[in-house]
Image: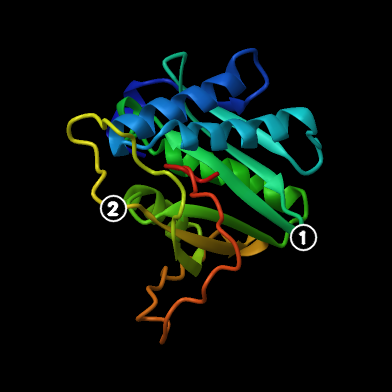
Amino acid sequence: MPDGARQRQIVIRRADRPGDLGWMVMAHGELYEKQFGWSTDFETLVARIVADYATEPSPATDAAWIAEVDGERAGCVMLVADDHPGTAKLRVLLVTPSARGLGMGTRLVEEALTFARAADFRRVKLWTTDNLVSARKIYQHFGFVLTEEERYRGSATTSSARPGASTSRPPQQDEYESEAGAVQGRSPMIRSPRERGGRPAPATSCHSPGVDACPTP
């Protein structure tokens, strides 16, 4: 455990308090505009994901968590059933900048995957973007492997990005999968297209970028 985690109180709990779901949307919108210059289109995407969860939750297959540091919200993640039987989606993973380095992203993903195993999911998948390096390392740690890549075709930048925001090119979005029942003690490498021996298969539709540790909507 990182040294800072012993000095600060970290709590991972269910996102079941007033304001939790709204915070997920707000935090994503503010953080990714500031860090990458992404427009409100991304915040709208996260709002739809959170609204879908809030409107028709299934306690047996869907859950969301909030991470707190010293009593303040500082991270979140969600796991929901996919349209394909036996598959779940990891979504809206985020850790605020002030709480990074405490192992919180890892703990959030671990909580979600523990729930996935208990719910008898056989596979977990997610979308993320290639500029979210820390998140990709977390997914690799838990055994996720790269399955698909495509250039994001949505609106990823604002017309007047903040200084320092990365707006030079749209992000590449990547899909990862993991066998839900074998994520502990198994850390296969996330392979690049070159390492996988060919070009990535084109996506049949434009999926939303993942939000972390980063986006993983």
Residue, disc 1: 86
**Tag 1, which secondary structure?**
loop
Dot 1, crowdedness within 10 Å: few (<14), some or many (≥20)? some
Residue, disc 2: 169
The N terminus appears in which quarter of the rendering?
top left
Q: Position of residue 211 (x, y in %)?
A: 48, 43
Q: Position of residue 16 (x, y in %)?
A: 68, 21
Residue type, mark 1 in image:
Gly
Q: Position of residue 54 (x, y in %)?
A: 72, 28
Can residue 67 be seen here? The reply is no
Residue at screen point 80% across, 60% down: 85
Q: Compared with residue 151, is residue 107 higher up or lower down, i.e. above or below?
A: above
Residue at screen point 52% across, 20% down: 23
The C terminus appears in which quarter of the rendering?
top right
Residue type, mark 2 in image:
Arg
Q: CA distance from mark 1 to mark 2?
A: 36 Å
CB atoms of marks 1 and 2 within 8 Å: no
Does residue 203 appear left or right of residue 135 in this picture?
right
